Image: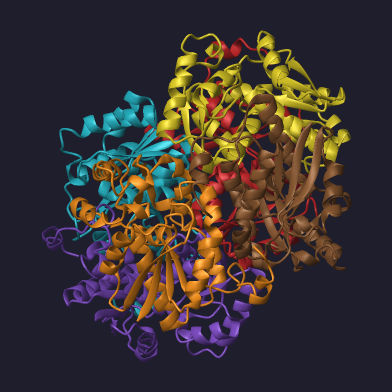
Chain colours: A yellow, B brown, C orange, D red, E cyan, F purple
Amino acid sequence: MMRIAYLDPVPEEAAIALFLDELKKHAGPDTEISYHTLEKGADNYEYQVYETCMGPLILDKIRKLEEEGYDGVILGCFYDPVLEAAREMCKRMVVTGAAQGAVTLASLLSARFSLLIPRDKNYTHMRDMVVKNGALEKLASIRVLNIRVLDLQDSEITDRRMEEEIEAAVKQDHAEAIVLACTMEAGKYEALQKKYQVPVIDPAVAGLKLNEYLIRCRRDCGWYVSKTGTYETPSQEEWASYQF
Amino acid sequence: MMRIAYLDPVPEEAAIALFLDELKKHAGPDTEISYHTLEKGADNYEYQVYETCMGPLILDKIRKLEEEGYDGVILGCFYDPVLEAAREMCKRMVVTGAAQGAVTLASLLSARFSLLIPRDKNYTHMRDMVVKNGALEKLASIRVLNIRVLDLQDSEITDRRMEEEIEAAVKQDHAEAIVLACTMEAGKYEALQKKYQVPVIDPAVAGLKLNEYLIRCRRDCGWYVSKTGTYETPSQEEWASYQF
Amino acid sequence: MMRIAYLDPVPEEAAIALFLDELKKHAGPDTEISYHTLEKGADNYEYQVYETCMGPLILDKIRKLEEEGYDGVILGCFYDPVLEAAREMCKRMVVTGAAQGAVTLASLLSARFSLLIPRDKNYTHMRDMVVKNGALEKLASIRVLNIRVLDLQDSEITDRRMEEEIEAAVKQDHAEAIVLACTMEAGKYEALQKKYQVPVIDPAVAGLKLNEYLIRCRRDCGWYVSKTGTYETPSQEEWASYQF
Amino acid sequence: MMRIAYLDPVPEEAAIALFLDELKKHAGPDTEISYHTLEKGADNYEYQVYETCMGPLILDKIRKLEEEGYDGVILGCFYDPVLEAAREMCKRMVVTGAAQGAVTLASLLSARFSLLIPRDKNYTHMRDMVVKNGALEKLASIRVLNIRVLDLQDSEITDRRMEEEIEAAVKQDHAEAIVLACTMEAGKYEALQKKYQVPVIDPAVAGLKLNEYLIRCRRDCGWYVSKTGTYETPSQEEWASYQF
Amino acid sequence: MMRIAYLDPVPEEAAIALFLDELKKHAGPDTEISYHTLEKGADNYEYQVYETCMGPLILDKIRKLEEEGYDGVILGCFYDPVLEAAREMCKRMVVTGAAQGAVTLASLLSARFSLLIPRDKNYTHMRDMVVKNGALEKLASIRVLNIRVLDLQDSEITDRRMEEEIEAAVKQDHAEAIVLACTMEAGKYEALQKKYQVPVIDPAVAGLKLNEYLIRCRRDCGWYVSKTGTYETPSQEEWASYQF
Amino acid sequence: MMRIAYLDPVPEEAAIALFLDELKKHAGPDTEISYHTLEKGADNYEYQVYETCMGPLILDKIRKLEEEGYDGVILGCFYDPVLEAAREMCKRMVVTGAAQGAVTLASLLSARFSLLIPRDKNYTHMRDMVVKNGALEKLASIRVLNIRVLDLQDSEITDRRMEEEIEAAVKQDHAEAIVLACTMEAGKYEALQKKYQVPVIDPAVAGLKLNEYLIRCRRDCGWYVSKTGTYETPSQEEWASYQF
């Protein structure tokens, strides 16, 4: 059994049902998935300042999850906030990000894919997530829904806009797969995938599957993040000596 | 339970014990792994002409494995022969390659890695495998053992040469992980990983773990290779009408 | 006199008149061009599985052509099937591909060019041909005719579609030259070039001109494909010992 | 007169004399430079977790500096911590980073340069700073001093090691300029530049010069960071509503 | 006080008022700016042959300006003619180009920008200016006004066309800043910047600000173009021995 | 018969025998090759200022050669001076450069090659020639002889140094072909090629072979440099109206 935490890096718990259902539905049979949030912070990541301010809160939460014995944690936001620092910090627990999971999988399942992003404010930041995950050569396009993150679940136009942009991505940009580039597009991938007959990747679920995979690599083969160089962990003593 | 075939794309079966032991040892608890070879063909892939000549034999074998109900097949050679065509052909079975598995994993576990290749004859071909898998930016170096593929298991100098090159990769090239870039380097990764304390990726085993992951993505989430565009399968009728 | 074979890597010979006329018309005065096909195989390369299955047939044919004393052979398909393996195999004969010829020439005659491809099924494969030939920086666009390869010669709409897409490539994509990215677009380049006053490159003819050039490099200067590393030829003895 | 703050993003003030002297010595005649630190935090950035934990402290300090009417602030660390978020947050004040200043200037003064970094732990992170500033094509090499950041000023071997690596960079890697890739290499550039007769760029001072330049662009021409898209500032109301 | 020459590399002086006003308006308080032209030559750079033919005239003028004690010279054309050679020739004077200034600044003020160019004749040449200045990753688009260089100031449609293309760049291409990619677009940036609320960079003025910045780097810090390798100056004796 | 001029873009004619012998020896049977120089100018291109100053002289000479009815001209210097402008100017004559010829051919004959350059002064300039010709991905290394251009023919150490660097390129850098990256390395390729059994490309001869190839493309197929966009020729009237 592997215990995996989904960390929705926002304070409110309103979205718990939505995500927990989706994650449980698609988890492996030996996965025990739980849903976690922060105690405080912003309710969105549309601005980089929020990401910076929430960094220590997320990192602290991840630290506790590792101490509690979790096998893995998924960062539930398409910016994969603090992913690099968390991989440096952890010594055993697997950390994956929603974007990392989605872009890695889209690269494995297609030769060319498009992102569906909420607003153009985040266009270059989203493109960076593709670059970071080594998939720029496979990026067909980034298409903008023009819907705020917090409205994605409730807006009447979300479904229509997603369909319009998927159609355009496939026909005009020659996309062979679609990445829903915001975790708040949750709950929608299966219907879209069925309708358009191309892989439509949900980032929260993709983050989970990547997490399961990397936990198995560690358990079955002893393969874990390199602790030489980039991801070397600071000593507990040194770290404890600092005040943040 | 997932049934996965390891296809050693060579005729002889001498290596069966070596690979089967390694694969069984590192397979997931719900994986049933079996070992397969071709009926004829060359015993190595050092030349591209052999890869071309064996292409139809491999493809035919994969077709049969899918018909027999296998969930996945691993191409047991670091050139991932016919991987692209096999992904086009298959409709349900997951096909992964040894290089694809190893390079994908090394990218996920480190910021920079080196390949250990048998001979310089294959230098540019090996580099291409890294490019294809989107990891060129993370390639620290390609280091050459100067040992023929078929001698890797038996040579007295293999272990020493691997150690020398891993040390150089880590110290001089700032590698944070190592990819053993030939399936015939099998059985060696664990000792090397323990000694050098960096991830040392065995490609056969990495191909297996990637396969398990992608089978789970298909089973649990309905995510499979896009059948639009690059990997669209030809119709059985059309294909059957040809003589090869 | 240089004897060059055009290898149409398909079984039927229906196209012989079309290609032979075009090639003879544009061959150099000291070139003796002949037309060859395979004895069996698929009649198109729209699927990668066909390319794999036909690989050994093409390679075998090329081997015989070299034994028969040909100076060069042109692979008559825009995917340049088995080009790399054939260059590894041959010791004296020059092998060129249609895409290699067309992309090389378009790069030499313009700062920016577009491809006209039959169907979007092959979009990423075609783009790869540009990458392989070092011209990605010069690629203005890939434009799709939406006509199947086998209909290109007969369809009533082919000419109109080609004109529409060339106009769009020049005006919208700032293309300065056009590559007809399928050998079945044969016989059309001269009229299009005259009408649009930009170089319009026919791949079969471009493969021929590149072949003549490389034969002269070998004859006049002793320059031939490097036999160190990537294109080192396997020994006849070793190869003969295998069964494919 | 332009008021510029140098923010040494660490708690202790021990280094004040070193930096303030260097900055005053090289500031423009109309620049009033002051030295600032944080109230708490780590004393180094060798680990990404420290950078994450100090993010909000730095951002808060920058916010106050803008409120106090400073024209510019320099982030005094070669990782340019929170630079992107700070540029998003600020509405008038110019924020520059030490790496941004050094890499931009080295690109303007040479066709090829090398970095001198303290330890190999940070090799890939340092390389990323070059990529972010659009200069990868000009990077000749990254050379490692093998001295901890906090020992750079005091170690007896620092000068010797810097000289050895500069010589190697120029002779072996064809570097035409050198970037001292840590602000703790302060106070050393002039002697090295004189000795080796190539530009040797100090990052703290380079961050200052870039800051002066961008302040003048704003004052004289109205050019400031784009507030459309990537660097759009969140509304004060929204931000104030969050608890971090 | 720094004496900076703006070199409009054309013979006529008709444009003197236009440029001199703009430059004086935006120069720093300690800058003395003067306007210079050539004695003969072409009145535009739409063709590369003109750029070649005017090369020696420009270089000679720059040589004289350095002898006369100027601190800096700005090449007043978006192709930055002879910039590389001039940097090699000069030993003290700072040489900057209009494109270099504009592209460097746009990269520092935005994550993504578009060029507005006069005619499509120069599309690839303009793109090269972005590549040379390390900003290709930030290029959102190149948009064409379809107005000849010499008509830009007088045409009734210039303003309308600029507005149309800026709107399209921001909305369709996700540009966050605009570069006016021809010095003859002078006098227009402020109104456009005010209207569209994104940085609109004038290349002549940007060339000036970059020049001031680099003069200060030299004066305050001793940083000047590397005289090792690429920009090593030939000896006066050797040069004087040649006849051109 | 095709009349091709080799333009040694320097004033002295001392080298005539050396080059003319080499070119005649390797020209095609239907090629009439002649040797031309400038009336004045520098005797080397080690500095970019010389290249600029000689630009109009070279262009004027090329213009005359086209008027005299030559079919092609080869720029006899590895910097391919004024190549782009000359391709813009000419309407019928084929212009090729020594670097263009050598790099194009090395890319066609190998998967990876090294340059042998005279001095490190020109390291980045030489690398640019590889980039311009689309071959950066195939560049194994640039190796420096440390011999001045004008000493290459006479120095006692030239042969030894070339051999040392070729050996190192093949063994250490995995080069599969060598480009002699200076026309003054003339007369040496055949012996080196024989000794090391890899293609050793002489740039003057390679420029000739590329020229012959492109003349045949024009004669036999009507393919010539695109006169739309980048290489559009200015009108004779406009050009004639200028004074240079």
Residue A2: x and y in percent read: 83, 26
State which quarter of the image contains the C terminus of chain D.
top right
Q: Position of residue A227 (x, y in %)?
A: 80, 43
Up-down relation of residue F98 to residue F184 (above or below): above
Rendering coords of residue A100 (x, y %): 65, 33
Q: Is residue A230 visible?
A: no
- F162 horizontally vs C29: left or right: right
Q: How many marks?
A: 0
Q: Nearer the viewer, residue E201 or B12?
A: B12
Instruction: Indicate whether B20 appears above or below F24.
Output: above
The residue located at (28%, 79%) in the rendering is F4
Q: Is residue A115 left or right of residue F37?
A: right
Residue under the point 15% across and 38% down: E154
**Residue A221 rendering spot, x and y as whole percentages:** 83, 42
Asked which quadrant contains residue D113, the reply is: bottom right
Nearest the viewer among E200 and F61 is F61
* Nearer to the camera, F38 or B98: B98
| Quarter of image, res B221 | top right
Looking at the image, is C107 positioned above or below residue A46?
A: below
Q: Quadrant of residue B165?
A: bottom right
Regarding residue F60, the answer to whether it shows in the image is yes
Toward the viewer: B198 or E199?
B198
